[in-house]
Image (cartoon, grey):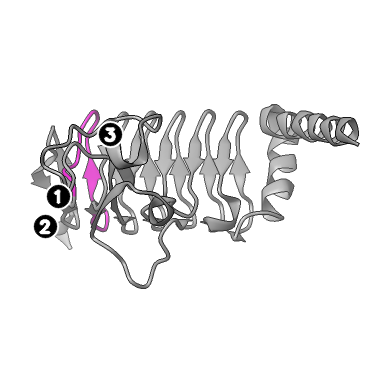
Amino acid sequence: MKIFKWVKQIIGSIALMFIIYLPGESGVLLRRWYYSKRLRVCGKNLHICANVHIVGHSLIEMGDNVKIRENVIIHTGSSKAKNEKRDVIEINPCNDFPKGLVSIGSHTDIAFGALILGYGGVRIGEKCGIGPGAFVLSESFHYKGKDINRAYKYSTGALPEEQCIIQGFIEFKDGAGVASNVIVLPGTVIGKDAWIGPHSVTRVKDSIPDDSVAKGNPAVVVLERPYKKTL
């Protein structure tokens, strides 16, 4: 009986590998069909390129005409923190947005190699852009927990009581964008039509104003988008 279960698992793994890695338009169409049956919400014309890894289907929503390029990882799920002994620091909670939900608005583009970690909740508005290699981290390890005498570890391999995590809802308002290799830390809100320049890092619980451009580590506003002056 066990061997039949094992064979079934192998067949399922091979099928999933075929779905994830099939190149070209055929792969896009196959993945569109596959994820339309599994995501919490799936809009029209979903375009997922090869080698995209998505974990936590039931907590992921995608609007119309969303495009996800090669090597992107979207990883989410119900947080284990309530069932473990880890210290948890929660910041910027959003009461009307379920923790762990990742919502990606219509006409949004996620570029090559980006990572979205959704355990604290991530809402990405319409017509947003996430650049190549950008990290959107709604959960991360933290060096300081409740016990000031404990040296907390940056490893899931450590004992639960040796870990401290920080979770925070992240929001990209409509038209917001982050360039290549930007790191967005827990609790960040990026305003409407605001952009963050390459290689920048937002602060925990940061807020980037509407219609602004920010850059640096930590990211700070360097200018307002000029079209505001002519409207």
Q: Are marks 1 and 2 in contact (CB under 8 Å)?
A: yes
The secondary structure that dominates the magenta segment is: loop
What is the three-letter code of the residue carrying label 1? Pro
Residue linked to disc 1 = 226
Q: Nearer the viewer, mark 3 or mark 2?
A: 3
- The alpha-carbon separation of the residues under discs 3 and 1 comes to 23 Å
Q: Is residue 38 visible?
A: yes
Q: Nearer the viewer, mark 3 or mark 1?
A: 3
Q: Is disc 3 surrounded by few (<14), some (14 to 19) or many (20+) residues within 10 Å?
A: many
Residue 6's quadrant in the figure? Answer: top right
Position of 228 with respect to 40 (left or right) is left
Residue 64, image x, y percentages:
56, 57
- The alpha-carbon separation of the residues under discs 1 and 2 comes to 6 Å
**Which region shows up in magenta?**
190-204
Residue linked to disc 3 = 182
Residue displayed at 59% across by 60% down:
40
Residue 93, image x, y percentages:
28, 63
Residue displayed at 31% across by 29% down:
181
What is the three-letter code of the residue carrying label 3? Val
Figure label count: 3
- Give yes or no for residue 202 being in the magenta stretch: yes
For label 2, the SS is helix
Residue displayed at 44% across by 51% down:
80
Residue 114's quadrant in the figure? Answer: top left
Q: Is disc 2 surrounded by few (<14), some (14 to 19) or many (20+) residues within 10 Å?
A: few
Residue linked to disc 2 = 229
Q: Are marks 3 and 1 in contact (CB under 8 Å)?
A: no
Q: 74 or 148: which is nearer to us? A: 148
